[in-house]
């Protein structure tokens, strides 16, 4: 059984206890707009992630799995960077399990967010399948003014860094080779 088949049904679980739907939307819009707004093309991917409060969880897991070294190198790399909001969509206990007991599985998931090479939005084609550091392909979908990666909308694209490009997503990508035995 594949991880996406196990985890995706749980993604509808709301992790926010705020009962005011309007306030949730407003907070979500603010988080989306602010994510990436302080990034600089003079900084590396890792430096930009570390200086943006929308990526504190990503920064922590990249560091604990050795990807901080990779994303500090000259690259170039393209990363589909999940915000804190994306990590909070995981079902209860999964994040803790990954960070405490299943670092290899977390490393596999993280490597599925990174592509060796710099891919700008203008160069993306509908149906394109770039290969990730995990050895698996992502599926790029172009719909009007939206870019989707494996069906997840890119909320901020083409953030230029000194060693590559950041695409911001508010969800996590899961490789097909991630099995349900992990959970």
Image (cartoon, helix red, strand yellow):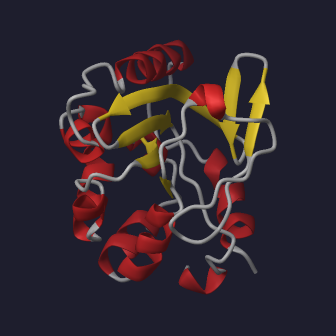
Please give the name of the residue rendered at 36% of the width and 26% of the height, measured from the top-left corner. Answer: 35
Q: Quadrant of residue 142?
A: top right
Rendered location of residue 45, percent (x, y): 30, 43
- Quadrant where the N terminus lies? bottom right
Between 46 and 34, the residue placed more toward the observer is: 46
- Vertical arrangement, residue 101 with respect to residue 58, above or below: below
Please give the name of the residue rendered at 24% of the width and 25% of the height, measured from the top-left corner. Answer: 40
User: For the image shown, how many numbered marks are present on the structure?
Assistant: 0
- Vertical arrangement, residue 52 with respect to residue 87, above or below: above
Please give the name of the residue rendered at 24% of the width and 68% of the height, measured from the top-left corner. Answer: 64
Residue 102 visible to the viewer: no
Please give the name of the residue rendered at 45% of the width and 44% of the height, measured from the top-left corner. Answer: 82
Between 162 and 83, the residue placed more toward the observer is: 162
Between 28 and 172, the residue placed more toward the observer is: 172
Rendered location of residue 8, percent (x, y): 69, 57
Between 90 and 178, the residue placed more toward the observer is: 178
- The answer to whether 15 appears left or right of 164 in the picture is right
Q: Quadrant of residue 18?
A: top left
Residue 87 visible to the viewer: yes
- Vertical arrangement, residue 80 with respect to residue 135, above or below: above
Rendered location of residue 76, percent (x, y): 39, 49
- Quadrant where the C terminus lies? bottom right
Residue at the farthest bottom position:
181
Rendered location of residue 96, percent (x, y): 36, 68
- The answer to whether 137 appears left or right of 48 in the picture is right
């Amino acid at each position: 059984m594949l991880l996406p088949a196990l985890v995706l049904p749980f993604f509808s679980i709301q992790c926010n206890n705020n009962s005011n739907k309007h306030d949730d939307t407003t907070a979500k819009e603010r988080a989306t707009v602010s994510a990436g707004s302080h990034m600089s093309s003079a900084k590396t991917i890792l430096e930009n992630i570390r200086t943006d409060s929308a990526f504190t969880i990503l920064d922590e897991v990249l560091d604990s799995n050795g990807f901080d070294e990779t994303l500090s190198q000259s690259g170039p790399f393209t990363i589909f960077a999940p915000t804190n909001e994306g990590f909070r969509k995981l079902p209860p206990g999964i994040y803790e399990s990954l960070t405490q007991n299943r670092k290899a599985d977390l490393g596999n998931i993280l490597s599925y967010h990174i592509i060796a090479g710099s891919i700008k939005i203008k160069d993306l084609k509908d149906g394109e399948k770039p290969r990730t550091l995990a050895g698996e392909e992502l599926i790029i979908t172009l719909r009007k003014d939206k870019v989707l990666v494996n069906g997840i909308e890119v909320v901020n694209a083409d953030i230029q860094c000194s060693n590559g490009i950041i695409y911001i997503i508010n969800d996590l990508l899961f490789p097909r080779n991630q099995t349900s035995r992990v959970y």
